[in-house]
Image (cartoon, rainbow, N blue to C red):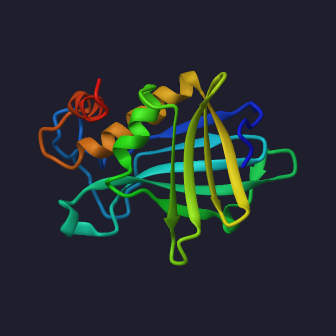
Amino acid sequence: LSASLPVLPTRFARQRSEAFPNASGAASAGHSPGAPRLRLRLFGKAAAHTLEVTPHRRGGDFLGVHVVSIDSAPALGSGVSYAWERKLVIQLTPEEMPAVIATLMGLTPSVRFGHHGADRSKFVELRRQESGLVLVTGEHALSYAVPVPAGTACYVLDLFCRAMAMAAPGRSVADVLMLVKSAHGF
């Protein structure tokens, strides 16, 4: 990957379900297994990402932790539609979540995690650039880069913090931010 990717325009869409805990940590009424999840979609000219809060695949052996899963798809033509049928799926681990939050908070300039997937060839990278951040996912030589402008980064930070807050009843987004800030020595 190039050290400096071009700054590309992006757009995003938020989707929220009442199936997730509210600010007090209590689950909202109407939760069902098929209910839509808390997610954020980021669109660039060359690719798009869907970031979604999901239970971690290890389930109960990791305290019922929720993490962010990222689906990435290449753009078709001019970046108006995307090839979601060819999407790349990566689920972050509970151990990776705080490092992503630290980068979103500006405590670290970048973070990269590799060795995802069955053949351990998938990766995810988040790094700061002139006008915000860029989120890159990939597998082998294939990569999907989508810029995240500063205004949109707030929503991405909120999504990651909400996922971590869901791990413990009574834990708030403010608690998550304090924990991450403390863990990074500030």
Please identify the residue farthest to the bottom as the structure is shown: 119
Q: Is residue 144 left or right of residue 30?
A: right
Viewer-closest of 25 and 164:
164
Q: Position of residue 92 (x, y in %)?
A: 42, 56
Q: How many marks?
A: 0
Please identify the residue farthest to the left as the structure is shown: 170
Please identify the residue farthest to the right as the structure is shown: 77
Position of residue 129 relative to residue 74, above or below, is above
**What quarter of the picture does the C terminus occupy?**
top left
Residue at (55% x, 22% y) in the render: 151
Q: Is residue 109 left or right of residue 4?
A: left
Residue at (30% x, 54% y) in the render: 66
Q: Position of residue 169 (x, y in %)?
A: 12, 45
Position of residue 26 relative to residue 151, above or below, is below
Q: Position of residue 164 (x, y in %)?
A: 28, 44
Residue at (86% x, 45% y) in the render: 78
Q: Is residue 174 left or right of residue 9?
A: left
Viewer-closest of 38 and 29:
38
Q: Is residue 167 left or right of residue 19?
A: left
Q: Position of residue 116 (x, y in %)?
A: 50, 66
The quadrant where residue 174 appears: top left
